[in-house]
Image (cartoon, helix red, strand yellow):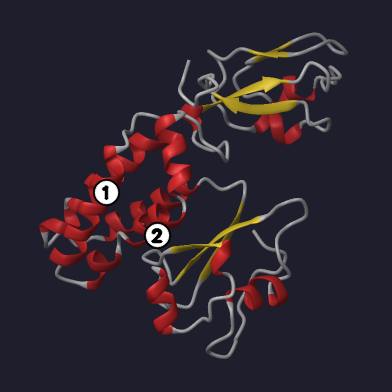
Amino acid sequence: KIVNGGLVEVPMGATLREVIFEIGGGMLPGRTFKAVQLGGPSGGCLPAELLDEPIDFESLVAAGSMMGSGGMVVVDDTTCMVDFAKFFLKFTSEESCGKCVPCRVGSQRLLEILERISAGEGTLDDIERMERLSEDIMEGSLCALGGSAPNPVLSTIRYFRDEIEAHIVEHRCPAGVCRPLIRYEIDEEACTGCHVCFGACPTQAISGERKQLHAIDQKLCIKCDTCRQVCRFDAVRVEPAVPVAAEGRPQ
């Protein structure tokens, strides 16, 4: 999610900021940098405060990531870090050869915990449980796949713990990505009744006459995001699925 993606050769010791913002051209218009995941699927996710870290073996390992294949995946504020970690862990768990239990079973259990959290069914104890399980997987696996698979999860806990806790405590996905935790609503003041979202909805969840206020039937909505993407008036909003009280707990 940067202006210039592709392949680039840089000297060892160049900083993340130089590669992402000077060579890569920075973030897309209107978006802010959130994280960079380095080294392939087993690499860790680093936050904005580490953008001035040099790209070398020792510095990246100390920060919770790795040089790996030299790849960088840059994401902005529209990316959910729980969903992001789940994406990489799903890949490594599927790649497990199955020979050793820590990797074969442990990665699946770790993925199941992340799936519970992204569905709003996690507990705060799950965070400590993921840390313990990750250590067991890394120490007990027979090869480097299992030994590095938990890196995206551990780095997310380390640098984006508040986002994980928002899913658990507030039943809220700050990035508006995790489908069980969001709903789509139409802004009464912004909607012009242009009927574009009405025609684009694949489940006919949107009702309303042309030039009149539209509404979304939450029972029919599959949260595919089509209505928001086609709306030219920014009238479709992504809201928490469960109203959150002032003290931060679901009502």
The answer to whether any part of residue 100 appears in the image is yes
Question: Residue at point 34% right, 29% down?
Answer: 121
* Total numbered labels placed on residues in the image: 2
The tag on residue 24 is: none
Up/down of 218 relative to 56, above or below: above
Question: Residue at point 59% right, 19% down?
Answer: 203
Give the structural element (helix, strand or loop) at label 1.
Answer: helix
- Tell me the quadrant of the picture where the N terminus can be found: bottom right
Q: Where's residue 84, x and y in %?
A: 46, 51
Question: Residue at point 79% right, 25% down?
Answer: 196
The answer to whether any part of residue 66 appears in the image is no
Residue under pointer 2: 155
Q: Where's residue 207, x and y in %?
A: 71, 11
For the residue marked with disc 2, what is the amino acid? Ser
Cα separation, mark 2 vs mark 1, equals 12 Å
- Sequence-wise, the earlier of marks 2 and 1 is 1
Give the structural element (helix, strand or loop) at label 2.
Answer: helix
Quick one: label 2, few (<14), some, or many (20+) residues within 10 Å?
Answer: many
Quick one: label 1, few (<14), some, or many (20+) residues within 10 Å?
Answer: many
Question: Residue at point 13% right, 64% down?
Answer: 140
For the residue marked with disc 1, what is the amino acid? Met
Q: Tell me: 174 left or right of 187.
A: left
Give the residue furthest to the front.
247
Q: Tell me: 113 left or right of 54.
A: left
The tag on residue 130 is: 1
Quadrant of the image occupied by residue 127: top left
Q: Where's residue 50, x and y in %?
A: 54, 68
Q: Viewer-proximal residue, 82 or 40?
A: 82
Quadrant of the image occupied by residue 101: bottom left
Up/down of 235 relative to 3, above or below: above
Q: Where's residue 225, x and y in %?
A: 63, 32
Is the residue under label 1 in contact with that under label 2 (CB below 8 Å)?
no
